Image (spheres, rainbow, N blue to C red):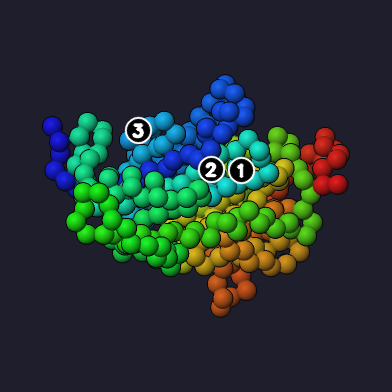
């Protein structure tokens, strides 16, 4: 029996380039790559509080309680796929469409005009682009709404009136510009650990597959309390044989290394070396708001076991 209509954000994320990949690599290898990408999308949906409804071929359909959550997730999916594709010939792209509005929920599936609109949006979006509607854009708050730009007005089959399409210009393109810290050298994650401390709690990032998320939303690994923090402010991840602090916020992140040198990053990644503090950037202060301590341990052992690193 169908439930009464309730408002949800419906998101479709569709892989791009799988046919070419199957032709180039063969069924087995291409299937492994495509399956890995779909798993990554599903995990991203769950990380942002969404529910994966189903996977149809190379497309994932998901729902969220709010337009903001779907917006954040869409940006993270495209950003993650871009970073995965960087420098790889064995990569796929992705395009995303999402809409917020009433849906009918029945047996772990959703139906209605909002679903149809979201499905149409993903079909219109090119590779690495995210499309939504004007109505959905009006539901998106904070700095996210500033990243939306009008694309075009289109007519959708079954709808009397045309809809205005907006693109989420995430700024995540700049995540591909990773900035080297002055003393940074490559280290191996299996030999080195990054210790992150805040308010007496300590987190250890050691596994290359582990990402530490930081922000105001309670789903983050490290939850910030300041109203200046973005819901998903930053994350620490392993890339290019080193640990990186990646800013995803509206206000930026201030990093002060062990020598007192200050660096502000805004939607880019900074390679972490040595020790220091980072936190929310504040134009009125030379110190980060809600500071977080970091320390890279085991670096010397890692360099001895990986003598070519950093050369």
Mark 3: which secondary structure?
strand
Q: Is residue 200 visible?
A: no
- Which label is found at residue 54? 3
Residue 127, image x and y in percent?
50, 48
Nearest the eye: 233 or 29: 29
Q: Quadrant of residue 254?
A: bottom right
Q: Are marks 1 and 2 in contact (CB under 8 Å)?
A: yes
User: With respect to residue 1, does 297 lie above or below?
Assistant: below
Residue 16, image x and y in percent?
50, 40
Compare marks 3 and 1 and give the one earlier in the sequence. Answer: 3
Residue 167, image x and y in percent?
42, 59
Mark 2: which secondary structure?
strand
Compare marks 2 and 3 and give the one earlier in the sequence. Answer: 3
Tally of numbered tags: 3
Mark 2 neighbour class, 10 Å CA radius: few under 14, some 14 to 19, many 20 or more: some
User: With respect to residue 266, does 75 lie above or below?
Assistant: above
Measured Cα–Cα span from mark 2 to mark 3: 19 Å
Measured Cα–Cα span from mark 1 to mark 2: 8 Å
- At x 62%, y 63%, the residue is 265
Label 1 sits on residue: 85
Mark 1: which secondary structure?
helix
Q: In this image, 1 relative to 30: left or right?
A: left
Q: Is residue 154 visible?
A: yes
- At x 68%, y 44%, the residue is 87
- Which label is found at residue 93? 2
Q: In this image, 233 relative to 255: left or right?
A: left
What is the quadrant of the N terminus in the image? top left
Mark 1 neighbour class, 10 Å CA radius: few under 14, some 14 to 19, many 20 or more: some
């Amino acid at each position: 029996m169908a439930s009464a209509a309730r408002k949800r954000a419906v998101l479709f994320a569709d892989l791009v380039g799988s046919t070419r990949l199957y032709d180039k690599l063969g069924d087995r290898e291409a299937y492994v790559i495509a399956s890995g990408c779909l798993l990554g999308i599903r995990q991203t949906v769950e990380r942002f509080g969404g529910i994966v409804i189903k996977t149809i071929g190379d497309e994932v359909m998901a729902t969220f309680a709010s337009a903001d959550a779907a917006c954040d997730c869409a940006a993270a999916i495209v950003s993650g796929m871009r970073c995965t594709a960087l420098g790889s010939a064995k990569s796929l792209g992705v395009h995303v469409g999402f809409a917020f509005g009433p849906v009918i929920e029945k047996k772990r599936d959703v139906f209605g005009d909002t679903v149809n609109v979201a499905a149409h949006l993903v079909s219109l979006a090119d590779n690495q682009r995210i499309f939504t509607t004007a109505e959905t854009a009006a539901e998106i708050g904070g700095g996210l709404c500033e990243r939306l730009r009008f694309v075009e007005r289109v007519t959708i089959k079954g709808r009397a009136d045309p809809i205005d399409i907006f693109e989420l210009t995430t700024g995540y393109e700049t995540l591909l510009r990773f900035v080297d810290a002055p003393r940074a050298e490559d280290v191996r994650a299996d030999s080195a650990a990054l210790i992150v401390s805040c308010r007496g709690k300590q987190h250890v990032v050691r596994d290359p597959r582990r990402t530490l998320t930081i922000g105001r939303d309670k789903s983050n690994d490290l939850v910030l309390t300041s109203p200046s923090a973005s819901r998903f402010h930053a994350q620490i991840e392993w890339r290019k044989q080193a640990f990186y602090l990646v800013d995803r916020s509206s206000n930026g992140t201030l990093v002060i290394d062990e020598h007192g040198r200050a660096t502000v990053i805004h939607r880019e990644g900074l390679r972490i070396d040595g020790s220091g503090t980072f936190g929310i950037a504040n134009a009125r202060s030379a110190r980060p708001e809600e500071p977080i301590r970091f320390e890279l341990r085991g670096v010397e052992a890692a360099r001895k076991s990986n003598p070519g690193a950093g050369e």
